[in-house]
């Protein structure tokens, strides 16, 4: 299968490319820069120049492929609403190229969208009127499914971890260094689901090869790690005090990240495991933080 991958040189997307090639597929990767294009060539993938803001490039890339995996997202949280809208438009452009075919489109979403306060499952849908603007991505997927596109979702947990991670855990570590203390919200028992990125990318490939139309998959290996344990491990590595924060003190420490630090998002992936025979085998979150180079 020839697979068009967006975000093909990102933390998740680059590993998706490697997993696809190992599985015997051909890869056409979206590249915005010369450096990204060279990285794809070096990996053994073909290059398609463009960006997720260039909708024509997305449609033309998807039209050249037998399937699409969309991992790209602009991770500038100061423009989160704007970037969620760009993702919605990108999903629509990818789907437009696949309409009327049986070619699969796999779209990335997040378990935080179904932050129910109980153990969330793949059957849970986000509130379309909810405050998280990334709900627009899942609504775009639902719209494509209504049009007959073979589209499905892979929801990633807040932490996709491992060597070279530049996501939420490194942000928490940087804040601890800056503030001189490692903090957690309240009693720190709020739960973050998590997955090693190599387990996650295996799920993307399984969803492409075996997934059903309009399916939702959860890519979390752990149902929930208490945030306090993350903070304690960071404090130990940095030799910093580990402290609870509430109210204004919490906001002063975490800033815009307060919402994410406070997530209580216990999530099951049992349906995904049963349907796709997905079995995570790599290190858990705390082991990766402890051993995978987070404190270089």
Image: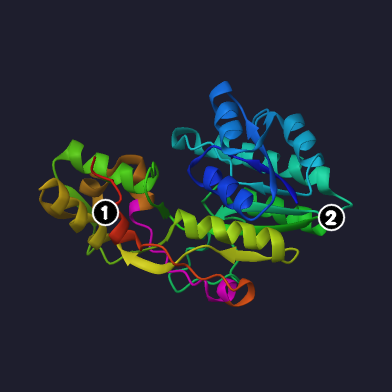
Magenta residues (range): 261-273
Badge 2 vs badge 1, beta-carbon distance below 8 Å: no
Could you tell me which quadrant the C terminus lies in? top left
Looking at the rendered structure, the secondary structure element under dot 2 is loop
Looking at the rendered structure, the secondary structure element under dot 1 is helix
268 in magenta: yes
Q: Decide if residue 34 is on the left or right side of residue 103.
A: left
Provide the major secondary structure of the magenta segment.
loop
The part of the image, by quadrant, that contains residue 216 is bottom right
Residue carrying label 2: 147
Percent position of residue 66, x then y:
79, 49
Percent position of residue 51, x then y:
64, 30
The part of the image, by quadrant, that contains residue 84 is top right
Q: Nearer the viewer, residue 232 or 266?
A: 232
Q: Residue at x 64, y 38 (%)?
A: 45
Percent position of residue 246, x then y:
22, 54
Assess disc 2: are there few (<14), some (14-19) or many (≥20) residues with their C-alpha within 10 Å of its C-alpha. Answer: few
Q: Residue at x 23, y 46 (%)?
A: 248
Q: From where the camera sits, is residue 245 visible? A: no
| Residue 222 position (above or below residue 160) | below
Residue at the top extreme, as displayed: 34
Assess disc 1: are there few (<14), some (14-19) or many (≥20) residues with their C-alpha within 10 Å of its C-alpha. Answer: few
| Residue 142 position (above or below residue 238) | below
Q: Decide if residue 47 is on the left or right side of residue 191.
A: right
| Residue 278 position (above or below residue 40) | below
Mark 2 and mark 1 lie on one chain; the one further toward the N terminus is: 2
Residue carrying label 1: 291
């Amino acid at each position: 299968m020839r697979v068009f991958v967006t975000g093909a040189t990102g933390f998740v997307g680059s590993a998706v490319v490697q997993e696809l090639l190992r599985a015997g597929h051909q890869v056409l990767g979206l590249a915005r820069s010369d450096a990204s294009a060279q990285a794809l060539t070096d990996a053994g993938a073909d290059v398609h120049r463009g960006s997720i803001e260039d909708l024509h490039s997305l449609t033309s890339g998807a039209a050249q492929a037998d399937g699409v995996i969309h991992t790209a997202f602009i991770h500038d949280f100061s423009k989160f609403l704007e970037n969620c809208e760009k993702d919605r438009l990108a999903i629509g452009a990818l789907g437009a190229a696949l309409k009327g075919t049986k070619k699969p489109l796999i779209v990335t979403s997040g378990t935080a969208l179904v932050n129910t306060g109980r153990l969330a499952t793949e059957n849970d849908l986000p509130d379309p009127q909810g405050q998280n603007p990334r709900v627009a991505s899942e609504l775009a997927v639902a719209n494509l499914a209504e049009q007959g596109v073979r589209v499905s979702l892979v929801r990633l947990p807040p932490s996709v971890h491992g060597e070279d991670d530049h996501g939420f855990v490194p942000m928490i570590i940087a804040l601890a260094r800056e503030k001189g203390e490692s903090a957690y919200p309240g009693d720190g028992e709020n739960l973050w689901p998590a997955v090693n990125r190599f387990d996650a990318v295996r799920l993307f490939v399984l969803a492409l090869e075996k997934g059903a139309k309009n399916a939702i998959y959860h890519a979390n290996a752990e149902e929930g790690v208490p945030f306090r344990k993350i903070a304690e491990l960071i404090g130990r590595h940095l030799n910093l005090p580990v402290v609870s924060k509430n109210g204004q003190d919490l906001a002063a420490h975490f800033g815009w990240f307060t919402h994410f630090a406070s997530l209580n998002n216990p999530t099951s992936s049992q349906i995904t495991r049963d349907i796709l025979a997905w079995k995570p085998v790599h290190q858990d979150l705390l082991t990766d933080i402890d051993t995978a180079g987070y404190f270089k």
